[in-house]
Amino acid sequence: MSSIYHPLDLNDQLPRELMLDGRRKRLIDSTRFQLAAVLYLPVLMLAFVVMGSVGASGLVTDGVCGLLLVGFSIYAVSSKFR
């Protein structure tokens, strides 16, 4: 069989693997996504503290936290379109 087929190069990747590898790096190496993920939790805690000290209801606090989540998600996803 080795006379018919030459041995495969271990460093040579298939085009499908290159495409999947490129997608994976774009998703993981997104600095905006990482920045949004790191900043969301402290901002969320700050929002809880401020809303608790103001005396806002639970529904308003949940709404503000949901809006923060949507805002940070839009910020993270917007890096793909730049």
Image (tube, rainbow, N blue to C red):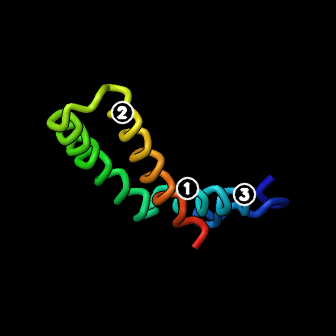
Say if 5 sits above or below 58 in the image. Answer: below
User: Percent from the top left, x then y, of residue 36?
Assistant: 37, 55
- Tell which circle, 1 or 2, labels the residue nearer the N-terminal end: 1
Q: Is the residue under label 2 in contact with that under label 1 (CB below 8 Å)?
A: no
User: Percent from the top left, x then y, of residue 4?
Assistant: 85, 60
Q: Is the residue under label 1 in contact with that under label 3 (CB below 8 Å)?
A: no
What number of labels is visible? 3
Say if 19 sits above or below 64 in the image. Answer: below
Residue 60 is tagged as: 2
SS label for mark 1: helix
User: Percent from the top left, x then y, of residue 32?
Assistant: 42, 63
- Tell which circle, 3 or 2, labels the residue nearer the N-terminal end: 3
Tag 1: residue type? Arg
The residue sitting at the right extreme is 4
Residue 16 is tagged as: 3
How many angstroms separate mark 1 from mark 2 (CA)? 37 Å
Tag 3: residue type? Arg
Callout in the foreground (3, 2): 2
Q: Quadrant of residue 6?
A: bottom right
Viewer-closest of 7 and 20: 20
User: Percent from the top left, x then y, of residue 70?
Assistant: 47, 47
- Tell which circle, 3 or 1, labels the residue nearer the N-terminal end: 3
Dot 1 surroundings within 10 Å: few (below 14), some, or many (20 or more)?
few
How many angstroms separate mark 3 from mark 1 (CA)? 12 Å
Residue 24 is tagged as: 1
- Quadrant where the C terminus sits is bottom right
**Residue at x 51% of width, y 55% of height:** 74
**Residue at x 72% of width, y 63% of height:** 15
Viewer-closest of 31 and 43: 43
Tag 2: residue type? Val
SS label for mark 2: helix
